[in-house]
Image (cartoon, coloured by chain):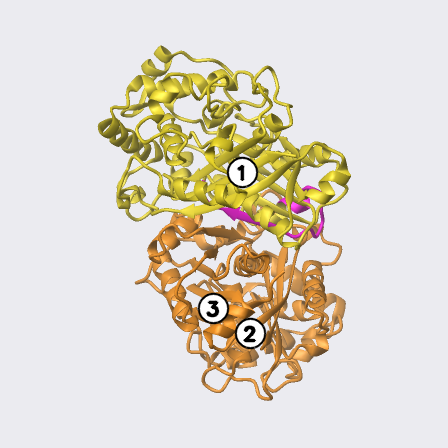
Chain colours: A orange, B yellow
């Protein structure tokens, strides 16, 4: 297989973007990435999107997006893995380049979540859970992650303050991200006194409903060198699934697919965790970031909450997590999230992170972890600056 | 890239299958393919499905299907390209094996279309068209293909009898397919006097609403040889898109994405059309088969209808089209169709087609063409018996 590089990135601001449609958002991010990479054509495109059928009544996004991007007849594939659709789009683009099938590939992600009326977004998001055994009986995602939080608190003594500290840290980082939906800081007390959604999770433990898109350009390292732009290498990819229903798992306080995908990605990269300088991870809820950091092996089991509270995951901590602000502050347009993580990794590794959130000591190697549903699917990628 | 083979196939009967769910259908087809190939494990899985979110409220099919297939933690990717989702699942599985990422990959397709109430299926299918410029204004798929039919009749003098002859031929073939939804023969007069749907298309010009699933196992030619089972080689894959909206095309009576995908696949295979012994093509409406055979170059432009009427596309004709019965008679569970085409190609090339529809003279090389929407995306594959 050929060595693969990311050679340019782009994204829209994340938020409630009433004046732009699903296709407008995708095209804006894609054009930004193309411009950033200075490529003169595309050979293939992957589009990560979770549920445009339910959100805006539009499937067939390969055709729609190639058409509106002005790339007539471009082969383009829409992929879906719930909230990990972006990570999957990145993996499929990686394989497309590595295999030799295509030289220059755009991997994009998009979701337009605010056009749906009433409780439609909650229904659409619930299609990432088990329709027959969870959703039909009333489960929603805040409810499922609340079960994980209760299990983690019961098993390890994880506290309300530990959960809140994840939100405080991510909003701190996100306050320096010009693309973030909620670029403001919050305090522990604000998180702990915000409105209850699903006990113990409060509104400030939850990532928001978001419109947005992100895109990156992948090519061979050989072509990346010729383009003369900053590039990073994709060293490893890991992909795994788990039971769709939370109740089928042996342990509610752990994410097996994240463990497996992380280990696969590290093995393929020939790296271990001590080589990784920071990570973007899937903090759809505060408890998710804690369980993910433990399942990846960054912290011991049961110690992720304590590490967050102590500041070990902050920008100056020993293992920075979500310098972008994460899903919590940056926003979570579900199909775009996995690609937006790669955008942040690219910026950090090439020294381009805005407004003071650039990590010190020149990070060299990073990890991006993106998951679907309650962890039913996970994609992990290892990236390194050239 | 490595040489890739299809080493086993399976499918459910197609039809209105009230007693089986989306996941039941997929698992039934997948287990049949695994059993047929006699593989002892899977390394990866792709799941083609157009709109399970709208049809049954379930996305995240990689996780659902790996879980219910008993393949816990298997990496699995759902892909979508409207009615070409199955063809896309096959292509992604091909690249996965060819690249060296995975050795044994299941490519499956599924759709459960009859559980949705009222005119829900028409709405769900319309998400393959342009939501903003076609669907919002009332266009449905029979309406869009009727426009193509009128354009073709106007331009080339294609007749009502020519359209009907496609249905007669496909129902004749499908009457010998034990998996077909409508395994009965129809006459020219029956087609021409069936109820009008969208002038000039009548109900017997249209493929049905169908539940069903299909699956195939891809591996390297090297592994296929060791398995000792009949196998066919995947020689070429072609993928292209076109404008999502029909009204944006220069010519309504032609399918540019089909032309491009066909030529790419042939080029990659090192073949020309005269090497191809038969084809499975996307006859979602009778007019579609005529336009597809012309766009692929099998017949001259404007001559596809005449060729069908003269019997040139029949089982004993000079270029058999849709020996399986096609979407028209076999049924069209949209996400499964592209894989079901590969199932038929495998059976024909390995001499296993049932009930007298086996082509004479030992076909060696075949083509499968699967398209989404009104031709907004197309996948073409070239396959050859070893």
Say which of marks 2 and 1 sits in front.
1
Q: Position of residue B94 (x, y in %)?
A: 59, 46
- State which chain disc 3 sits on: A
Badge 2 is on which residue?
A232
Residue A117 can be seen in this image: no
Residue B320 can be seen in this image: yes
Q: Secondary structure at mark 2?
A: strand
Residue B382 badge: 1
- State which chain disc 2 sits on: A
Do badges 2 and 1 share one subunit? no
Give whichever of B358, A49 is nearer the camera.
B358
Magenta run includes residue A199: no
**Which residues make up the magenta segment?**
B65-82
B319 shown above or below A374: above
Give whichever of A239, B54 is nearer the camera.
A239
Q: Secondary structure at mark 3?
A: loop
């Amino acid at each position: 297989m050929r060595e693969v590089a990311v050679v340019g990135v782009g994204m829209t601001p994340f938020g409630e973007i009433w004046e732009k449609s699903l296709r407008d958002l995708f095209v804006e991010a894609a054009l930004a990435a193309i411009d950033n990479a200075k490529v003169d054509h595309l050979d293939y495109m992957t589009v990560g999107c979770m549920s445009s059928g339910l959100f805006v009544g539009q499937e067939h996004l390969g055709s729609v997006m190639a058409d509106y991007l002005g790339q007539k007849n471009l082969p383009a594939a829409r992929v879906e893995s719930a909230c990990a659709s972006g990570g999957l789009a990145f993996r499929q683009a990686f394989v497309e380049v590595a295999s030799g099938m295509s030289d220059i590939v755009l991997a994009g992600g998009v979701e337009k979540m605010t056009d749906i009326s009433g409780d439609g977004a909650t229904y659409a998001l619930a299609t990432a859970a088990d329709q027959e055994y969870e959703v039909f009986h009333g489960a929603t995602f805040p409810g499922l992650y609340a079960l994980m939080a209760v299990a983690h608190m019961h098993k390890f003594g994880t506290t309300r303050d530990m959960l809140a500290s994840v939100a405080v840290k991510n909003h701190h980082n996100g306050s320096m991200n010009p693309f973030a939906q909620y670029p403001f800081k919050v305090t522990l007390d604000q998180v702990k006194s915000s409105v209850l959604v699903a006990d113990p999770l409060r509104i400030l433990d939850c990532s928001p409903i978001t419109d947005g898109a992100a895109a990156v350009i992948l090519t061979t390292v050989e072509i990346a060198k010729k383009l003369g732009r900053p590039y990073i290498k994709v060293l490893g990819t890991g992909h795994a699934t788990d039971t769709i229903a939370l109740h089928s798992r042996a342990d509610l306080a752990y994410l097996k697919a994240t463990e497996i995908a992380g280990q696969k990605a590290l093995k393929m990269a020939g790296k271990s965790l001590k080589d990784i300088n920071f990570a973007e991870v899937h903090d759809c809820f505060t408890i998710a970031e804690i369980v993910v950091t433990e399942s990846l092996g960054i912290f011991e089991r049961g110690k992720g909450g304590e590490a967050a509270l102590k500041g070990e995951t902050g920008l100056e901590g020993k293992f920075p997590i979500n310098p972008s602000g994460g899903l919590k502050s940056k926003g979570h347009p579900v199909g775009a999230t996995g690609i937006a993580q790669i955008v942040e990794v690219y910026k950090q590794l090439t020294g381009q992170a805005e407004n003071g959130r650039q990590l010190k000591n020149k990070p060299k190697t990073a990890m991006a972890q993106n998951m679907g549903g309650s962890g039913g699917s996970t994609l992990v990628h290892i990236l390194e600056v050239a």
